[in-house]
Image: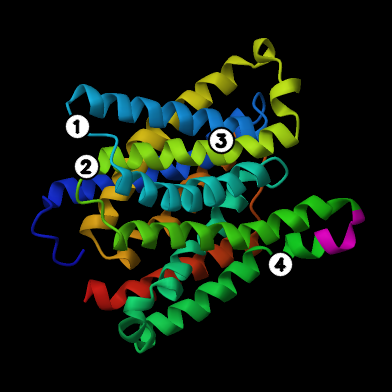
Amino acid sequence: MTSLNKTALPVMVYLAFAIVYIVWGSTYFFIQKALVGFPPFILGAFRFSVAGILMLGWCKIKGEEIFNLKTIKIATVSGVLMLGLGNGIVIWVEQFIPSGLVAIMVASAAIWFVILDKSKWKENLSNKYIVSGLIIGFLGVVLLFSDQIAQAVDKPQSNLQIIGMALLILGPIAWAGGSLYSKYHPTTGSSVSVNTGWQMLMASIAFLPGGFLKSEFKLLDWGSIPLDAWLSIGYLILFGSIAAFSAYVWLLKVRPATQVSTYAYVNPVVAVLLSLTFTNELIGLTQIIGLVIILGSVLLINLPKYK
């Protein structure tokens, strides 16, 4: 890793990267387990509302100011883009697309970080390594889903898969856009914890219209939710949201966006390993080759930083 921000201890940076790499990689697996008991919109609303309230409550106990209008406005935009759209799409498509493949597709977020970071266009797009990485990464994503795209075209009943794959293109764009907005609109009057808490709380509100339109709140029998689903959503709240998302928002403040975006290439490896170990999901040779290509693209994209 290149020279670290003088305000951030190296050990804290490495720890934050480890949390984001490993914990977020596991969340794809636990989202699919939670969906056994929770419908998607309720899952998102419940997960992020509880995590946001816990985070803001803890900040209030520590004596921090939590009602800062500027912070709330910025957190609303970034939170809805990242968690409401970006993560919300992941939750919805995991109803019918394997978690390992979802994680691999979301890896394209690293590419969108470079494309959407306008202030770094001159630096990034004039670099042959970054441009090559973008092209190779795109080809890798296409290759990853080539088999599934072909199957979806052949089977009329797979319309949801086609919609899901289209949304999995939009999701990483929303996530990268929200992340960059958060990075370039710092909330100087509030801590990272307060900002993160509002991002999660405002994102939870974005899930509510979908829940009402799909009658999820009316149809869900809370007493029939299995223990595994409760344990999974507990893991998502404590580790996926409070621990990992907080670490991610902090990293955006102290490290270059392209370097932070490398989480998107490590997460699929963790997700695939969990899927292969604990479920009946299968990852074919084409997907493995595509993953290797994408991992190669992140090396190229970040090669100037590593040098």
| Mark 1, residue position | 64
* Quadrant showing the C terminus: bottom left
User: Is 20 part of what is drawn in magenta?
Assistant: no
Label 4 and label 3: CA atoms lie apart by: 29 Å
Q: Dot 2: within a 10 Å radius of its alpha carbon, few (fewer than 14), some, or many (20 or more) residues?
A: some
Which mark is first along the chain, 2 or 1?
1
Q: Which residue is drawn at 44% across and 65% down?
A: 110
Which mark is first along the chain, 3 or 4?
3
- Would you say the residues marked 4 and 3 are in contact, meaning their CB atoms lie under 8 Å apart? no
| Mark 2, residue position | 191
Which mark is first along the chain, 4 or 2?
4
| Mark 4, residue position | 146
Looking at this view, name the residue that lies furthest to the top: 223
Q: Looking at the magenta stretch, what is its main secondary structure?
A: helix
**Range shown magenta:** 152-156
Which mark is first along the chain, 3 or 2?
3
Label 2 and label 3: CA atoms lie apart by: 24 Å
Q: Which x, y percent locates residue 107? A: 50, 60
Q: In which quarter of the image is residue 60?
A: top left
Foreground disc of the pair 4, 3: 3
- SS at circle 1: loop
Which mark is first along the chain, 4 or 1?
1
Residue 264 visible in image: yes
